[in-house]
Amino acid sequence: MTAELQVFMLPDLGEGLTEAELVNWLVSVGDEIRVDQPIAEVETAKSMVEVPSPYAGTVMVLHGEPGQTLDVGKPLISVAPIGAVVSTGSTNESPLSEPVETSPVETYREEEKAGSGNVLIGYGTPGGSGTARRTRAPRAAVEPDAQKAADDLLLLRTRVPGKLGAVISPLVRRMAREHGVDLGNVHGSGDSGLILRRDVEAVISTPVVEPERVVSETQEDADSRTGLGISSRTPVKGVRKAVAANMSRSRAEIPEATVWVDVDATALVELRAGLKKSDPHTTPGLLAFIARFVTAGLKRFPDLNTRIETAADGAQEIVGFAGINLGFAAQTDRGLMVPSVRNADKLSARELDVEIRRLTGVVREGKATPEELGSGTFTLNNYGVFGVDGSAAIINHPEVAILGVGRIIDRPWVVDGELAVRKVTELTLTFDHRVCDGGTAAGFLRFVADAIEKPGSVLADI
């Protein structure tokens, strides 16, 4: 039957996101794909996401190139349904059913599907249903005929001359694609020049020396205001673009105020040290203990666990939540990320510790979901890990408050009228003055501080 191409539009991968950067294609033109198979890696303002296909069929067009920013709702990939004859009425594609002359490459394709047996021991040949994960340079603007010719050339270059069946392993080809290795330039160490896994691994392990980028000190590359040469230009995109937009919006919309207090954390440090001696493997970290105090404090001062919504007519309302999704700042190679522990108010300190560690690992791998990154109702920021004592943090819009924790250091402290050396930290609360007054903010901050100084009662459930 005749069928139109199925065009998959880039979906909204998170709450209100309007664009995503295409990082990598996981399929190529001509691949047969299945429903829910990952087809591309994209970087949103919140995370790195693998996009699955809602269609099964043959990939006809890839709409974009790595590094390109794609708008939500615009075409991402075009797929021809399985067994369908594609109508060319609205596309430039050639019909899939058009007869072509069988070439050695086509013979190779069929042989590979059937399983030639000429592969590395232990890896086998691909079956009819398997689809290898591919990482290949995109060819969105290449016509199907040109694409087919390029694929044919690649296959011919990776065959041993005169031996149609002596092809390289599918595993080896996939490894080469994922690491950007041109098999046409690889000398095989196997019989008759067969390219083996070790040949590709050798290329991958060879360090690539990037040419040093030298910026000319000419007038063309000089800054007009300072007269200095320009050493680099870094596009503001991806996570950095989202952070910049969010922080700018926060400062523009939120009338924020900040309160802070120094806290004697000696009792908490000693409590954790005692627990760690008896149970070194499951004792929560200090951040998990403080997270537990924060959730308890937000139950008492729920105004800080809200959001302000503005209607089209300008009317505003404060929206409260039946639960707490506790965000925490985590530094990654892609910038500062804020994953959130969902329903954190229902978790003990041990359970919070497990989830904080899990989410930290996920965001550092770039695999956090939009729900894990965009659902917070209050943020806890442990900037003490950077060796600083305090910070007037910017609220993570659309939340209304953020609590910062500085480093814990030995400081002189008066205890029962006498000077002593204690473990002291600084808590800083920045809050939206529209949702509450200073009394509420100070009450919450004092509650958390008191819990740190006398942790026993709040931590009864760990």
Image (tube, grey):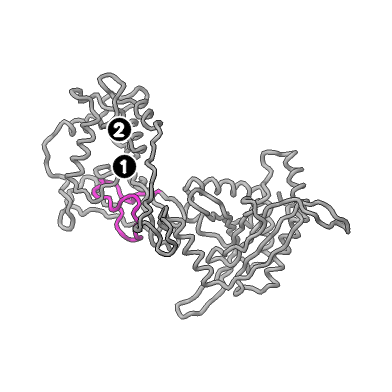
Name the side, left or right, on which 427 lies relative to 133: right
Neighbor class of circle 2 (other Cα within 10 Å; few <14, some 14-19, many 20+) is few
Q: Alpha-carbon distance for marks 1 and 2?
A: 21 Å
- Counting from the top left corner in percent of width and height, residue 400 is at 58, 67
Question: Would you name the residue on which mark 1 appears?
Answer: 136
Neighbor class of circle 1 (other Cα within 10 Å; few <14, some 14-19, many 20+) is some
401 vs 208: above or below? below
Q: Nearer the viewer, residue 401 or 341?
A: 401
Name the side, left or right, on which 380 lies relative to 164: right
Residue furthest to the top: 191
Q: Quadrant of residue 34?
A: top left
Query: Is residue 154 magenta-colored?
Result: no
Q: Secondary structure at mark 2?
A: loop
Query: Is residue 63 magenta-colored?
Result: yes
Q: Nearer the viewer, residue 344 or 205?
A: 205
459 vs 174: above or below? below
Q: What residue sits 28% from the left and 19% below the top?
A: 191
Q: Is residue 432 visible?
A: yes
103 vs 386: above or below? above
Question: Would you name the residue on which mark 2 appears?
Answer: 127
- Counting from the top left corner in percent of width and height, residue 241 is at 44, 59
Q: What residue sits 46% from the left and 56% below the top?
A: 239
- Counting from the top left corner in percent of width and height, residue 401 is at 60, 65
The residue range painted magenta reads 50-76
Q: Is residue 51 visible?
A: no
Mark 2 residue type: Gly
Mark 1 residue type: Arg
Name the side, left or right, on which 326 lies relative to 190: right
Q: Nearer the viewer, residue 322 or 459?
A: 459
Q: Label for residue 408? A: none
Q: What residue sits 52% from the left and 72% below the top?
A: 253
